[in-house]
Image (cartoon, rainbow, N blue to C red):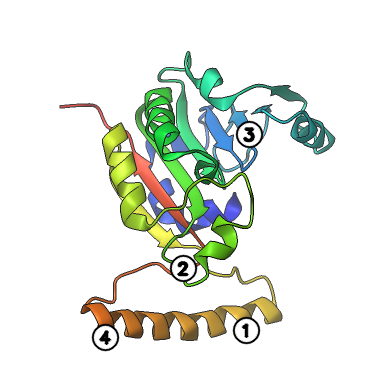
Amino acid sequence: VLRILACFYEMLLGYDFLSSNSTNATAIFNQTRTLTVNKSTVISFVNVFGIDISEEQIRAAQKLGVKNAVQADAKEFLKDKKSTYDLIIARDFLEHFSEEELLELTILIFNSLRTDGAFIVQTVNAESPLWGRLRHGDLTHKTAFTHTSIAQLLRLAGFREIRSCPERPPILGIKSFIRRLLWHVIELKIHLYLLIVSGSANGIFTQNFITTAKKHELS
């Protein structure tokens, strides 16, 4: 979650609901269709309420100190949560739904957000050279996205201000710093290859990527 927030730190700081005195609701989904609802500030993540379709994940959440965790289906849970949340984060989540399910799900998420609320997604990147490693590495994965295809989906659901960024190796020490440098070399070569074959170097090539979108009042 911190890596997701860091990717859009400057954008998030611009949101009115990030006041240090705010008590806004945040929903977080993970790869097992988990939903956690936060009634404190977005950054601190305290007083968490969690929902997961997996009983095992509920027990794991409780061991981590998430006392208010119950077993439920995310789509069913969201149906009566109109204009409830200021921020919804979906981490390794959307790829577990079929194309037929995705539009219904994203519309539910859109409707669950308050005006000017945000939706942040981390998902499998179909533009990565090794995308199949993640897409087919889990039998429950049903789809993968590029930054353009996820933007199409989010626009259909009503979202605007859609932005995507790569999820590069985080720098946590000397070894990870070297990994990050080597990744930039690889990334540069892929951009160069794409420029040669297509005339455009635009693309995101990390295994996962992160997208943010906002809900605005319809004019």
The residue sitting at the top extreme is 80
Q: How far apart in space, not on screen, are marks 2 and 1 (Cα)?
A: 20 Å
Percent x, y for residue 89?
51, 40
Pointer 1 with pointer 4, Cβ within 8 A:
no
Frontmost of labels 2 and 3 is: 2
Q: Is residue 190 left or right of residue 50?
A: left
The local secondary structure at tag 2 comes to: loop
- First in sequence: mark 2 vs mark 1: 2
Frontmost of labels 1 and 3 is: 3
- Amino acid type shown at disc 3: Thr
The local secondary structure at tag 1 comes to: helix
According to the picture, the residue beneath numbered tag 3 turns out to be: 34
Of 141 and 41, nearer the camera is 141
According to the picture, the residue beneath numbered tag 4 turns out to be: 196
Frontmost of labels 3 and 4 is: 4
Q: Is residue 17 visible?
A: yes
Q: Residue at x 58, y 59 (%)?
A: 134
Image quadrant containing the C terminus: top left
Query: Is residue 54 positioned above or below 189 on the image?
Result: above
Q: Residues within 10 Å of mark 2 (few under 14, many from 20)?
A: some
Q: How far apart in space, not on screen, are marks 2 and 3 (Cα)?
A: 26 Å
The local secondary structure at tag 4 comes to: helix
Q: How far apart in space, not on screen, are marks 1 and 4 (Cα)?
A: 28 Å
Pointer 1 with pointer 3, Cβ within 8 A:
no
Percent x, y for residue 113?
41, 27
Q: Residue at x 57, y 36 (%)?
A: 28
